[in-house]
């Protein structure tokens, strides 16, 4: 019998990579799909923490990451020994971690969240009277503290792509447009940018906002996130003027260099069984990391 190979692609991969996939989505959708799909091999055209999450949720499947270099700055900026000490300095707090974290990091967490469910999960914990610490994304944590008047202590790592969106550059771009303009933004962007946004949400959340848009037809809609998703947005609504939000001057690139390592050649090789196998996590590490992820999936059902 032939191997059942399922290919998953995040929205930030190039359009032609998305076309090679059985499922395209944001991190929550891809985690759920990885858990439930019947596959001998899952090829994860995304970044390493996503492939690790797929392995943790579907340990029977072989999981292959196409390129060794597909990491994430939220992971590389987090030293897990320092994180452990930080977590231990708040013994009476619940530790909520963003899914953009290593398996070791997840194992030090009580809850995992994605950009899609983070608001609801933290609101639920506060409603239960819990005290919360949040890692690793400082921008996302700052936004939550601002938006809901929380007082969460925050770990300090950023997404190197979203952190480049800039309020002054945005003000300039807005001033140059006489008509209506909107901004939608991913919560990994800096707080001054998020404070100007008409909508803040996950990649899928922003895509749904675009699909449902029914305001001024001539408005310019700026999008503060990685540019891969613009393909899906323009495909869904070719009638709209959708633009990448500006980043600080002198800096040209708002693409995730790690996502873009998923080239056609690398994905094809992975589909043929070559690539980075996620086979280095012990059962104990996977069990410890699975607990807070399952808590999230149960909550989000
Ligand atoms: P989503 O949870 O919106 O898919 O975002 C993942 C990510 O890496 C954003 O930079
Ligand atoms: Fe990580 Fe940022 Fe790339 Fe997302 S866009 S994978 S948060 S570096």
Image (tube, rainbow, N blue to C red):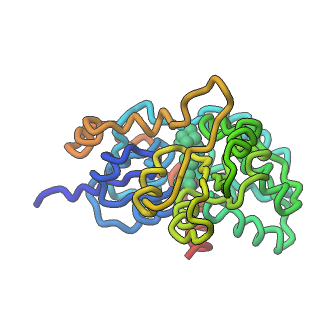
Front residue of this view, candidates 89 and 238: 238
> Which quadrant of the figure shows ligand 2?
top right
Quarter of the image for residue 291 reads bottom right
Quarter of the image for residue 173 reads top right
Query: Can you say which quadrant of the picture contains the N terminus?
Result: bottom left
Residue 299 in picture, x, y percent from top left: 62, 73
Single out the residue that lies furthest toward the top. Answer: 250
Single out the residue that lies furthest toward the left. Answer: 1
Residue at 45% x, 36% y: name it.
70
Quarter of the image for residue 105 reads top right
Image height of 221 relative to 172, above or below: below
Residue 222 in picture, x, y percent from top left: 61, 50
Image height of 211 relative to 192, above or below: below
How many marks the image carries: the answer is 0
The answer to whether residue 287 is seen in the rendering is no
The answer to whether residue 248 is seen in the rendering is yes
Q: Is residue 199 left or right of residue 298?
A: right
Residue 191 in picture, x, y percent from top left: 78, 47
Residue 121 in picture, x, y percent from top left: 70, 67
Front residue of this view, candidates 11 and 83: 11
Single out the residue that lies furthest toward the bottom. Answer: 301
Residue at 71% x, 60% y: name it.
198
Q: Is residue 77 left or right of residue 127?
A: left
Front residue of this view, candidates 83 and 218: 218
Residue at 51% x, 37% y: name it.
256
Front residue of this view, candidates 106 and 185: 185
Query: Can you say which quadrant of the picture contains the C terminus?
Result: bottom right
């Amino acid at each position: 019998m032939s191997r059942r190979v399922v290919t998953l692609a995040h929205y930030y991969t190039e359009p032609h990579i998305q076309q090679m996939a059985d499922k395209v989505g944001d991190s929550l959708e891809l985690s759920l799909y990885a858990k439930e799909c019947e596959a001998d091999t899952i090829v994860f055209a995304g970044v390493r923490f996503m492939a690790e999450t797929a392995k943790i949720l579907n340990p029977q499947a072989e999981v292959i990451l196409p390129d060794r270099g597909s990491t994430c700055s939220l992971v590389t900026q987090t030293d897990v020994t320092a994180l452990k000490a930080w977590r231990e300095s708040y013994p009476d707090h619940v530790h909520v971690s963003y899914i953009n974290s290593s398996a070791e990091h997840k194992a030090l967490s009580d809850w995992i969240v994605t950009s899609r469910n983070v608001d609801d999960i933290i609101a639920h914990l506060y409603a239960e009277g819990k005290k919360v610490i949040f890692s690793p994304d400082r921008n996302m944590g700052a936004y939550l503290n601002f938006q809901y008047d929380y007082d969460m202590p925050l770990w300090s790592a950023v997404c190197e792509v979203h952190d480049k969106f800039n309020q002054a550059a945005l003000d300039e771009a807005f001033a140059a447009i006489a008509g209506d303009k909107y901004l939608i933004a991913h919560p990994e962007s800096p707080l001054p940018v998020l404070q100007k946004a008409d909508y803040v949400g996950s990649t899928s959340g922003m895509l749904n906002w675009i699909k449902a848009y029914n305001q001024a037809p001539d408005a310019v809609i700026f999008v503060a996130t990685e540019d891969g998703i613009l393909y899906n947005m323009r495909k869904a609504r070719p009638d709209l003027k959708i633009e990448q939000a500006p980043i600080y001057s002198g800096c040209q690139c708002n693409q995730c260099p790690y996502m873009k390592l998923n080239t056609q050649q690398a994905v094809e090789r992975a589909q043929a069984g070559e690539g980075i196998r996620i086979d280095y996590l012990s059962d104990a590490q996977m069990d410890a990391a699975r607990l807070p992820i399952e808590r999230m999936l149960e909550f989000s059902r």
